[in-house]
Image (cartoon, rainbow, N blue to C red):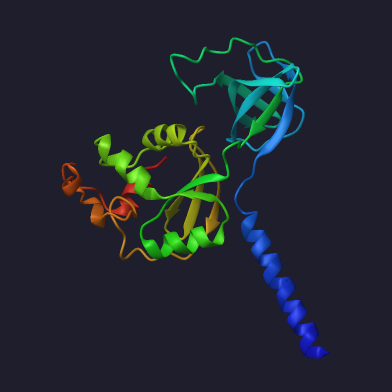
Amino acid sequence: MKNISLKKFLFIILASSSLLLANALPNSITTTISSISPNGNIQLSSKVPSGMSGIVVHNYGNGLSAITHSSISQGNGVANLLPYTAILHKNIPNIQTEAQVGDKVVFGNFYNNALLIAPNQNIYSRITKTYKRAWLHPDAYALDFMEEGETTLSLESIQRFSKLNQVGLVLIVVPNRVLILDPISKQYLGAIPIQTDEKNAMAPFFARFKQMDVSAFGFSSNTYPPYYQSVAGLK
């Protein structure tokens, strides 16, 4: 009986730990517009952490709704409104509907889609196995990075790539922490402690191209700064 109780206790502890780890990353929050200020900011019906980005959805009735704006939470139940630019196409008309009280606002609408910028495969595997997300492999960002002729990581580069690929969260490994970035607002939402080793770091970040040498694919060979130097500039 004692062995059974001990096993049950250990199972509960492990299950609780896994749940806490899973909840360490922010999830989407749905709220509504309760009022609109003369300066264009919106008051939300619930508080949303500062820095979370999202979308405003207007319901036209008869089962028809559409995204009308983007929004970034300023904290304390306040958010600003921005043009919705995630989908730009000459054959898709811009929606002219103004934001209205009662419109739904979904913050973190793409937070299930995540990109991890890590120094090596070991740390990459450890994090992606711990946190349940739809992980976009950094190979995709590496190809885009090189196609754009980038040599140093920047928030602008990450934001542009995230918009094109509907990435909602970007995790960035720095010494002994993982920073959680909303790439649309370019604001950090928090950090997770992790043990890191500054040895064996790829430059400028881990991808399945050895040291980003893709001259065989027609890309010129560039010199990149060391990983931890590169991520230190992401402010």
Name the image quarter holding the N terminus.
Answer: bottom right
Q: Is residue 189 left or right of residue 11?
A: left
**Residue 115 place in picture, x, y as percent:** 46, 47
Q: Residue at x 57, y 42 (%)?
A: 111
Q: Relative to the observer, which residue lies in front, 128 or 157? A: 128
Q: Is residue 81 left or right of residue 210?
A: right
Q: Is residue 91 left or right of residue 229?
A: right
**Residue 93 place in picture, x, y as percent:** 52, 12
**Residue 171 place in picture, x, y as percent:** 48, 49
Q: Relative to the observer, which residue lies in front, 196 or 59? A: 59
Residue farthest toward the right in the current orientation of the protein? 1
Q: Residue at x 49, y 22 (%)?
A: 85
Image height check: is 37 above or below 14?
above
Residue 162, quarter of picture:
top left
Image height check: is 232 above or below 3?
above
Residue 39, quarter of picture:
top right
Q: Residue at x 58, y 55 (%)?
A: 132
**Residue 25 place in picture, x, y as percent:** 60, 50
Name the image quarter holding the C terminus.
Answer: top left
